[in-house]
Image (cartoon, coloured by chain):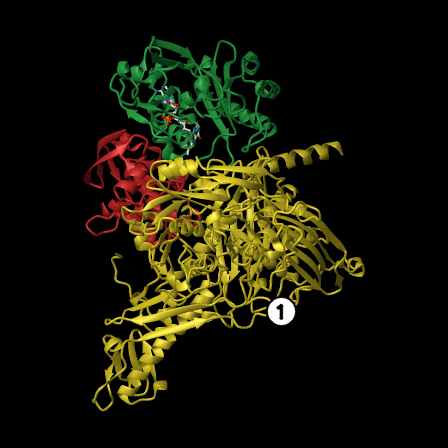
Chain colours: A yellow, B green, C red
Amino acid sequence: MSKKQQHTVDPVGKSVPRVDAFEKVTGEAKYVDDMFFGPDMYYGKLVLSPHAHAIIKKVDVSKALAYPGVKAVVTGEDTPYRIGLYMQDRYIFARDRVRYVGEPVAGVIAISEEIAEAAAKLVEVEYEVLEPLFDPYEAAQPGAPLIHPDMESYTWPPFIFPEPGTNVSEHFKLRRGNVSDEGVAQEVWDQCAAIVEQTFRLPPIQHVPIETHVAVALWELDGKVTLWSPSQSPFAQRDLIAQGMGISHGDLRVISPYVGGGFGGKAGVSIEANVVAMARAVKGHPVKVRMTREEEFTTTNVRQSLYAHTKIGCDAEGNLLAMETEYYFGGGGYNDYGVNIARAAGYSCTGPYRIPNVKGDSRSVYTNTPIGSAMRGFGMPEIHWGIEQIMDQLAEKIGMDPAEFRRKNAVRTGDTILTGMKMTPINLVACIDKAKELIGWDEEKKPSAPNKKRGVGIAIMWKAPAMPPNPGSSAIVRFNEDATVNVYVGGQEIGQGAFTVAAQMAAQALGVPFEWVRVSANPVDTKYSPYEWQTVASRITWSMGNAVKRAAEDARRQIIDIVAKYWDEDPEDLDIRDGVVISYKSEREQPLKKMVIYGLPNENYEGWQGGPIIGRGKFMPTYVTNLDPETGQGTRAVVHYTVGAQAVDLEVDTETGQIEIIKIASVYDVGKAINPDLIMTQIEGGAVHGMSSAFEGIFFDKDGRPINASLVDYKIATIQDIPKKVVGDYVETPLPDGPWGARGVGEHVMVQTAPAIANAIYNAIGIRVPDLPLSAEKIYTAIKEKEAKEKGE
Amino acid sequence: MRPFDYYKPKDFQEAIALLSQEGKKTFPVAGATDLIPMARDERWLPDIVVDIKALPGLRELKLIDEGLYVGAAMTMNEIAASPLVKSTWDVLAQGASSVGHNQVRNRATVGGNIATSSPAADTPPSLLVLEAIVVVRGPEGERRIPITEFFLGPRRNALKKGEIIVGLILPTPPEGAVGSYHRISRRHGADLAIVGVAVLAYPKAEGFGWRVALGAVAPTPIRVPQAEATLSAAPGKPDEAVISQAIQEAVAASRPIDDIRATAKYRREMIATLMRKAIEDVLEKL
Amino acid sequence: MLHEITLKINGEEYQVAVKSHHTLLTVLREQLGITSPKRGCENGECGACTVILDGKPVNSCMVLAVEADGSTIETTEGLAKDGNLHPLQEAFIEHNAVQCGFCTPGMLMSAKALLDFNPHPTEEDIKVALAGNLCRCTGYYRIIEAVKDAAVKMEAEK
Ligand SMILES: Cc1cc2nc3c(=O)[nH]c(=O)nc-3n(C[C@H](O)[C@H](O)[C@H](O)COP(=O)(O)OP(=O)(O)OC[C@H]3O[C@@H](n4cnc5c(N)ncnc54)[C@H](O)[C@@H]3O)c2cc1C
Ligand code: FES
Ligand code: FES
């Protein structure tokens, strides 16, 4: 491969090359749709609901079944199971009613995809159309028609608080300081020199991984089931499908090779359960279902819409005093994953600020739109959109520089934050300072043409991994005869560099060169890979990293014990450096080759000791506590927070409303940069993703049918749309329970890009856009309205 | 996609016979960049697809007495890169180079672009200001259709069943003519036009002659004669007042719609912005 | 309707019977097992399926397989020669221009076609050549760097 043979000792902190790049540039990497499943594979096509909200009166599959080449048709009749990661509210195939356009109603299995597609059109479904609800705020009002009338019969974990009898699937309440359910006390507001109150709306957007969802399932005659899917959560898929369909976890195997982009969209379960149910109807034959790009938009999942109403106040010196906020997430037809997004938005509702008096209510609400689920940032991009624009307005009102305002109020290590938890170590102020420097905050910036206006903006963020209190990671380290090492993990490589980081950590902890490590996680295979909860929440570097480090340390300890015994020395005097066991005392050396498998003779050379080395490690946070359901208060809401600052320099073309981004500067506190260049690739990709997201939105007609569910009219950033420059840096405030102090950064890098752009637009043209997307048309129209107003005055 | 049959005839007779079959939905195919998406969505349901790329004259680009002949199956990239086109008919090169993205431009043909007759297509405004003539062959032989009479509505045109566009004749514009095509879309890369404006001007006895065409703002791409007349009536280079008036007239002649890409209102505003840019561009080059 | 066609793919000749309405992408992937061209939209929008057809990058989902009869096709499988990576492949590795990798084969094909035809591309040339290749992961900067770097290395090797 590479011409020079690399040899990297102590790789942690070094920008070693990715371990998965070679197979990806040669085309050798086989994604699920590239794999060959043999001639007896069948293909499936899902029959999708054309209605946003309707009762299913009758499903007639007879014509489809009679179509030549069709092997079976599966409907809700065959799958009387509800599944869901948090809220078990979703039938695999709709049974009594459909709740969004694109919901799977039946699955046709045939000998070819074309036949399945043709026959799918012959499935006749009789619907009684109901009134659909699209707006989360309206849907949450008492008296709104119910999308899930039998919500109270569902199951959910103890930290989720749905309100049966309404469309609210989760209601997180935060009460801190001088507040009541009515709000922050008037006496507090009276102390405020500036108050800003505003409503913000965000449309649903989509992950748009370039690989759409695909799944292949095989149900063998003996009842063993295998599912191949590009997944961020092979183990969670196994768990949910096993529980939902009554399969033993031991008999369900999920195999997940390369993932062609995840961004949260491939977390949890979407079409995979449908495909397993379809495979059961044709036992012995693998069944493949792949989403077209159009189906991907409707039938997999999206980022929720949000209606936010927020009021924040500060005193004349700029100290934040009070905040009231209401978040209504439009969770879509099913909130199986989404309830936890509303919860996360609730316990982080202030953004990264010290605010003594807070009343927050965060709800996820059933709406008749595609399923809202995890997407990069998990609620944080949505809430920071409003928070960060209000902070700018407050700063302006009291005549303070917006960056200085943030510096003053930014959360600091050890603060008691809104949930009562002590803030884990971070240095947000340093991030702000660096971002200012990188963007040239105080320099004068001239527009490039008379019709252009230039502006800078800043936004800061925080985000905690949002997950149950006790998600676990595990890892295995196994030596080979030549002392190369196989590291087994169940976390997934979704492009973020997880496998490279795992290899670096294993090499570092073992004391072997980086190049000796092979990450044996492709595919992640629940039959052979050690358990990992999910590759989400930016938790892998931290949680899986801890497990890898511990597994490596376990193996290292075993090796040292064997050599110590062989040399009759104290293990404390031994170390492994560059793949050799050395004694600091006797200065003896023992290469790892062979001994890691065959062991070494006993000290008296009679018999042998040791044997194949296998190290094991696990990690699970044990300290997260429940929060009080009425106040959101508790000792430890989350494991930790990652924070960061982003500054944007841009130009607005006043003749078109188009925005040209000149520079984005991003700085995050990563704890420890395990691989600095991989962090930079996240920072670059995240800034572009964040920028792109500010211009994205899925829109629906009055019946709830998406009108831009294709790449023709759902536009993501191309290479011609990127900012002229993205620059980045990081701060390293070690996380006490992070491997080498590291914490995750994969999601954070896009969380506050949209509001940073909005703040820069304001700086350029004095216009605030409270609703996403930031289309050129919207900005142009606002410019014209402002001009007209100014003329009129 | 519903299955269809495919033929690749070498001569017009066979091609026209195939395309003229009664009771069958027949489609010529060139670059297939409209045909495949439309067939995939089942908005078009061809029974028979006839590949016309091997027909004589369809892949030629050459000077003829009347001006330039561009074979219908010439691709956007071929047109955009052609020194001949760039010499005198550059506004077409500009239109062609704005289509989609590189991979699409390597397939998409000018014949297909006009045959699809999308109101938002990128070559028609340029072809309109160049006063192109569409050369067509069909069951009744060859005929010539001025481009101004070619487009009849969204995805509707003057072609009859069995007819094939052979090529376009681009008359040599008056001496000293320069043209400019401007378009706006939501994203810079590979996005359909919200508005496209082509402007062509040339020196005449007194002042300049002007031609202006708009895309994506009416059921078909259109010329805007009143605006042209206003510009052309100016004794020399049109001044600000004349330009403003012409722009108003062009906007008045447009009939844009609201869709996912833009509202009619924004489209109207962008006609003004782009037309001004195109005029300024042309004035600079004149 | 079936057509017997001949394709020269990465230097090998393939004879295959294809249906009229099947795209080149479908035939490469499903009939010939050449899977580096990826299926991302089948609508000409994402570029993941890009191959080089008779020297030009095209979306293989926008070409009927039968139209390609007699053509020469290059895919990422054929980039490395005699076990040596193409300079573009090396540059993509070195610059971390790959994340999830799904866009990578299409990117490489567009980039190769560019460099074959224009060995000294400007940044603007690179952007124009790659505008039809969507990448949701990298933000594109590393890809631009990698193409520039490969151009320099290819020049040096000459
Ligand atoms: C991703 C993408 C982006 C695009 N972006 C743009 C854009 O920005 N601007 C733009 O204008 N277009 C765009 N298009 C549309 C399309 O590429 C163009 O309209 C193209 O010029 C069509 O030409 P073609 O040769 O591919 O047509 P085909 O698909 O081969 O044919 C299109 C239609 O024309 C008919 N036809 C073709 N040739 C002839 C002929 N010689 N005689 C009679 N009928 C004929 C066919 O029967 C068919 O009805 C885009 C398409 C894609 C896939
Ligand atoms: S699959 Fe061909 S362009 Fe997307
Ligand atoms: S690397 Fe994932 S899409 Fe480009």
The residue depicted at 38 percent of the width and 50 percent of the height is: A279
Name which quarter of the figure residue C62 lies in. top left
Q: Position of residue A166 (x, y in %)?
A: 66, 51
Label 1 SS:
loop
Q: Residue at x 29, y 87 (%)?
A: A565
Q: Vertical placement of A709 versus A590: above or below? A: above
Give whichever of A208, A405 is nearer the camera. A208
Figure check: B71 above or below A80: above
Residue A201 spot, x, y in % from top left: 63, 45
Residue C69: quarter of image: top left
Confirm if mark 1 falls within 8 A of ligand 3.
no
Q: In the drawing, does residue C67 fall left or right of residue B188? A: left
Number of marks drawn: 1
Q: Name the kind of residue labelled 1 in the image.
A: Met
- Which of the two residues, A247 or A667, is positioned nearer the viewer here? A247
Q: Is residue A737 left or right of residue A520?
A: right
Question: Is residue A15 something one can see in this rendering?
Answer: no
Q: Is residue A550 left or right of residue A420?
A: left
* Quadrant the N terminus of chain A occupies: bottom left
**Residue B83 in sight:** yes
The image quadrant that residue B245 belongs to is: top right
Mark 1 packing: few (<14 Cα in 10 Å), some, or many (20+)? Answer: some
Residue with the mark numbered 1: A421
> Which is nearer the eye, A79 or B164?
A79
Q: Position of residue A228 (x, y in %)?
A: 37, 53
Quarter of the picture containing the C terminus of chain A is top right
Kindly identify which chain the residue marked by label 1 belongs to.
A
Asked if residue A33 is positioned above or below residue A251 in the image, the reply reads: above
Residue A587, image x, y percentages: 28, 85
